[in-house]
Image (cartoon, rainbow, N blue to C red):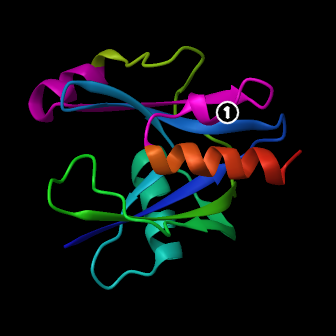
Amino acid sequence: MFNLRVYGILVNDKKEILVSDELIRGGNYTKFCGGGMEVGEGTRDCLKREFMEEMNLKIDVGDHIYTTDFYQPSAFRPGEQLIAIYYFVHALEAITARINTKPFNFDKEELEKAGENGEAECFRFIAWEEFSAESVTLPVDKLVATIIKSKMI
């Protein structure tokens, strides 16, 4: 069984990288924005839907960065193999979602939702100078962070 995920790398005009800080099953994870592809959906449409659902943000999907090319078990779905696809994305409008300056700074509403399903999410930008593979949690995200740093020197 495969778990197909699509993620967008948004770099703002200050050359900061957007990340999502998430509480998942009691653990804190910093990852790129995006999520699971649904049946009948293409990768780019998936990414547009995910940004709209998570941030109420219209995006344009740009260049492909990377697709997983090694075996990676899913971190959250035992027995499934993760296939992750990454693209650069560009905001088509001003970001109106709350952007934090501190990691895992969930608002009260997010924490109340976490009580119901054990998950919460908030967003922040990481300055280019501070961004690295260590800025994100999951193995494929770490690889993509390294690729981004090498492409955008």
How far across and how far down the image is residue 113, in percent? Answer: 20, 29
How far across and how far down the image is residue 56, in percent? Answer: 48, 49
How far across and how far down the image is residue 51, in percent? Answer: 49, 54
Residue drawn at the location 15% of the way across and 53% of the way down: 78
Residue drawn at the location 63% of the way across and 41% of the way down: 95
SS label for mark 1: loop
- Which quadrant: the C terminus? top right
Q: Is residue 1 left or right of residue 31?
A: left
How far across and how far down the image is residue 18, in percent? Answer: 62, 38
> Outermost residue toward the left?
116
- Label 1 crowding class (10 Å Cα cut-off): few <14, some 14-19, many 20+? some
Position of residue 58 relative to residue 124, above or below, is: below
Q: Is residue 124 left or right of residue 76?
A: right
Position of residue 79 relative to residue 147, above or below, is: below
Identify the residue under disc 1: 132
Q: Is residue 90 left or right of residue 153?
A: left
Looking at this view, is 84 or 51 the one in front?
Answer: 84
Q: How many marks?
A: 1
In which quadrant of the rendered view does residue 14 lie?
top right
Looking at this view, is 12 or 82 the one in front?
Answer: 82
In which quadrant of the rendered view does residue 106 lie?
top left
Q: Which residue range is magenta in the image?
A: 109-138
In magenta stretch: residue 116:
yes
Position of residue 124 relative to residue 61, above or below, is: above
Position of residue 25 relative to residue 65, above or below, is: above
> Outermost residue toward the bottom?
40
In magenta stretch: residue 70:
no
- Which quadrant: the N terminus? bottom left
* Visible residue check, residue 127: yes
Residue type highlighted by circle 1: Ser
Residue drawn at the location 18% of the way across and 32% of the way down: 25
